[in-house]
Amino acid sequence: MKKKKRRLRKRVFLILVLGLLALLFVRSEWMSHWLYPVHYREAIVSSADTYELDPHLVAAIIRVETNYKPEAVSRKGAVGIMQLMPDTANWAIKKGGFEDITAESVAKRPEAGIEIGSWYLGELNDQFEGSMVKVIAAYNAGPTTVNRWLSDGTWDGEIGTVDQIPYGETRHYVQRVIYYYNKYEELYPDFRVE
């Protein structure tokens, strides 16, 4: 009798698992949103709007930098949800005139990190005349480095030639951000605060 009950439980469990898997495939949009979530939506949309950025780009950079974990600290010392180096954060705070944000708050408060990171992205966007690929590369390698690559012909700044970026880390960073940018654009076409 016990063996029959065990077999019945196993069958019921198997049917439930198969049903759940079938539901996931049928509801693949739900699964995609679960796999590619966007946290801190209000802060992302607000900052992107303020600095004339695409919120999908801000979300993609956050995804690649920290996967929405605001307490992350890189091996190189970058802090906050958008992983700014402390010197870059302090420079952005000073140049942007942010009186209520400090480098410490960038590291501890996701909204502050998104604000300063978005401001910096806006500066890069202006410097690189709206070229998203150059902006992404500069966010990772620094604008001086990207300008050097462009001026000496190492890289032409185009998406089709990302494989020519000499830093492997930056090359893969650009590819990953573009991947997530496209995913977020597909999954969240009307990116706004919900």
Image (cartoon, grey):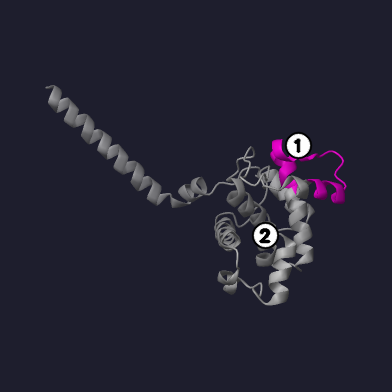
Single out the residue that lies furthest toward the bottom. 153
Query: Residue 173: x percent and y percent?
Result: 59, 58
Picture layout, residue 186 above or below residue 47: below
Precedes in sequence: disc 2 or disc 1: 1
Picture layout, residue 151 above or below residue 106: below
Q: On the rendered structure, is 127 left or right of 79?
A: right
Magenta stretch holds residue 92 = yes
Magenta region: which residues? 90-116
- Identify the secondary structure beneath mark 2: helix
* Residue under numbered circle 1: 104
Q: Along the line of sight, which residue is nearer the eye, 21 or 58? A: 58
Q: How many marks?
A: 2
Residue type beneath disc 1: Glu
- Identify the secondary structure beneath mark 1: helix
Picture layout, residue 164 above or below residue 32: below
Q: Would you say residue 159 is visible in this rendering?
A: yes
Residue type beneath disc 2: Ala
Quadrant where the C terminus sits is top right
Residue 145 is marked as none
SS majority, magenta: helix
Give the class, few, some or many, for how many residues have Cα within 10 Å of label 1's Cα (few <14, many ≥20): some
* Residue under numbered circle 2: 141
Q: Quadrant of residue 139?
A: bottom right
Give the class, few, some or many, for how many residues have Cα within 10 Å of label 2's Cα (few <14, many ≥20): some
